[in-house]
Image (cartoon, rainbow, N blue to C red):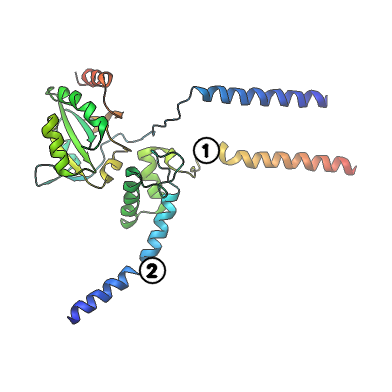
Amino acid sequence: MKILKIFVIIQILFYFSPLKADQKIFQNKITKNLRCLICQGQSVYDSDSEFATSLKLVVKNKIDEGLSEDQIYKFLTEKYGEWILYDPQFNKNTYLLWFLPLLLFLFGGTMIFKKLIKKQR
Amino acid sequence: MKNKITYFIFITSLIFTFVIFYKSLNKSNLYEPKSKIENIPEFKAKIFFENKELTSKQIFSQNKFYLLNIWASWCIPCRDEHSLLLNLSNYDQLEIIGLNYKDNLENAKKFLNELGNPYKKILLDNDGTKAIEWGAYGVPESFLIYQKKIVKKFVGPLNFDSIEEIKKLIK
């Protein structure tokens, strides 16, 4: 009986372990950045489709195996292409996507700056 | 001069928007993932009707064509393509392997008894994780494999055209 009690206490402690909670937060962070390919406009985290539930399990297994966030994204983009990621990764296909807003901002800024200088003169 | 520039920018942006919208008119909103998988994924799977587990290398070990078909008894399009799979199972140079996706075993058995069994082996995928290893996102999906490489992927149920294509490829 004593052994059983100790066993139950250990189980409860293990169940509420902060390590597990951290893992869940990490898993959610990843699945929120994954697009559910069969449901329109939903992330894997939000969806309960067969595909999304399996993908959540795969992400969990990969975390258990010790893979990092980037490694999991790499694994999934190999299977499903860049489209599965909401946050596009930085590569030669996405340079324009990442830099265009910055370039437009700089362009607009210089225009305003020039106009202001002209006015002052 | 200033007016001319504004006029030019206005016209260019109008043409630009028109071209984008016009091109999008004929674009399908159904997206098919661009998978980069060329080789068969590595996994272990339980075999239906047999009490053993095999690795993917053991399953696709021979020097012949394999057709991996992801199916389930609850999937209606799988019923439609089943007769075509039975037809393909008559070809000696092709071995059809099934991947039973998130299914109830009893229902799967009934399905095969009712419609026939075109599969040489059936792998079990109770939680859907093995289908993800293949880059699949639904049922049915089929992969034509030769020398441990994926030759062709078919998303959705096979039809007469895809069967003809498979027959041409395995000849």
Above or below, B42 relative to B158 = below
User: SS class of the residue under badge 2?
Assistant: helix
Which residue position is annotated with label 2?
A18
Residue that mark 1 sits on: A94
Q: Nearer the viewer, residue B62 or B34?
A: B34
Residue occupying image coordinates x 30% and y 30%: B156
- Rendered position, B159 above or below B72: above
The chain holding disc 1 is A
Per the rendering, the mark at residue B169 is none
Dot 1 falls on a residue whose secondary structure is loop
**Crowd tier of the residue under label 1, counting other residues whose Cα lies within 10 Å: few below 14, some 14–19, many 20 or above:** few
| C-beta proximity under 8 Å, tags 1 and 2 | no
x and y, in percent, of residue B9 in the image: 72, 26
Q: Residue furthest bottom?
A: A2
Residue plotted at (17% across, 34% down): B97
Quadrant position of residue B18: top right
Residue B64 as seen in the image, left or right of residue B134: left
